[in-house]
Amino acid sequence: MIRLLIKLFLLLLMFISFDCYSQNQESDSIEVSKISINFFNWYISATKNHKTDEYNPIEIENKNGMTTLDFSKYFKNLKQLSFSDSLLTKERESYNECVIKLSQIKYTDYLKLTDLDQF
């Protein structure tokens, strides 16, 4: 969650720095502002309403009965918010270690955990 905000902030800074090189600075600036505002409105709304599946992958059972992460809803939201495919790829890669570790736990056992510190 924090990583996503940091990445978005860095992305915003990058867009602002490129702004001086663009041909139509005003419209580019407005577009970046709209994208940023849309993201934060979405994120704040989802967190206020405790909809963590909107901004995080969710744990599901794979075809072998083990635990894995489903990114479909999370990435669908990010695409609608104008995130690039390369940023989505990097975000997916940031979860690789988690996916590997989860794949070693039966989903039924994972559901029994009441505190993720147990994991």
Image (cartoon, rainbow, N blue to C red):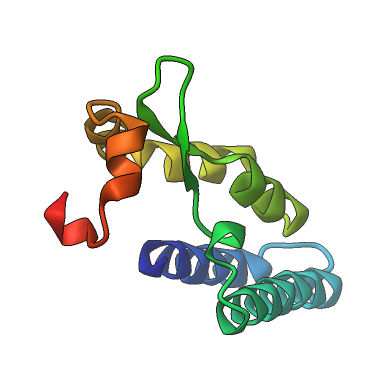
Q: Is residue 42 left or right of residue 10?
A: right
Who is closer to the viewer here, 107 or 24? Answer: 107
Vertical relation: 105 (above or below) 111: above
Residue 30 shows in the view: yes
Residue 83 shows in the view: no
Q: Is residue 24 left or right of residue 49?
A: right
Residue 57 location (% of width, % of height)? 50, 48
Vertical relation: 46 (above or below) 101: below
Kindly give the residue lying farthest to the left in the view shown: 118
Report the residue at 77% width, 54% height from top: 80
Vertical relation: 22 (above or below) 60: below
Kindly give the residue lying farthest to the top in the view shown: 64
Res 91 → quadrant = top left
Q: How many marks?
A: 0
Who is closer to the viewer here, 39 or 35? Answer: 39
Who is closer to the viewer here, 62 or 14? Answer: 62
Residue 72 location (% of width, % of height)? 63, 40
Report the residue at 60% width, 50% height from top: 74
Residue 46 location (% of width, % of height)? 63, 74
Who is closer to the viewer here, 19 or 60? Answer: 60
Q: Is residue 110 left or right of residue 49?
A: left
Residue 93 location (% of width, % of height)? 38, 36
Report the residue at 67% width, 74% height from top: 36
